[in-house]
Image: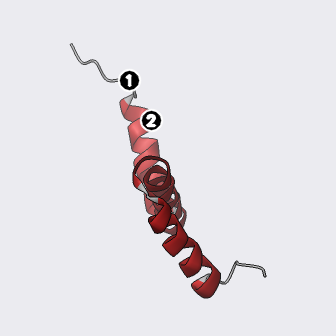
């Protein structure tokens, strides 16, 4: 017996969405990874470094 939680149809729909919207899929994946890193692994020094990078290099940063 197959104990999958997600149906084959749903898995296929996810795969198709990722093919149609690769930039959004990459964005969501990166965002998830960043949040996991910040919550579980980052030190205070890591976060300071990331904030400096954000302030200096991110076009979305507003002074």
Label 2: which secondary element: helix
Above or below residue 21? Residue 62 is below
User: In the rendered image, which residue does mark 2 sit on?
Assistant: 10
Camera-nearest residue between 57 and 52: 52
Q: Residue at x 47, y 62 (%)?
A: 30
Total numbered circles: 2
Give coordinates of residue 43: x percent, y percent: 44, 58
CA separation in Å, label 2 and label 1: 10 Å
Q: Residue at x 57, y 79 (%)?
A: 52
Above or below residue 41? Residue 11 is above
Give coordinates of residue 36: x percent, y percent: 45, 50
User: In the rendered image, which residue does mark 1 sit on?
Assistant: 5
Q: Earlier in the sequence, mark 2 or mark 1?
A: 1
**Which quadrant would the C terminus be assigned to in this image?**
bottom right
Q: Identify the residue at the far bottom of this view.
A: 56
Q: Residue at x 52, y 64 (%)?
A: 27
Give coordinates of residue 31: x percent, y percent: 52, 59
Q: Identify the residue at the far right of this view.
A: 63
Q: Identify the residue at the far front of this view.
A: 44
Q: Residue at x 46, y 67 (%)?
A: 45
**Which quadrant would the N terminus be assigned to in this image?**
top left
Give coordinates of residue 34: x percent, y percent: 48, 59
Camera-nearest residue between 7 and 34: 34
């Amino acid at each position: 017996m197959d104990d999958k939680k997600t149906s084959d149809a749903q898995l296929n729909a996810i795969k198709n969405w990722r093919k149609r919207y690769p930039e959004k899929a990459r964005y969501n994946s990166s965002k998830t990874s960043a949040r996991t890193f910040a919550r579980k692994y980052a030190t205070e020094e890591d976060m300071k470094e990331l904030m400096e990078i954000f302030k200096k290099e991110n076009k979305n940063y507003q002074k």
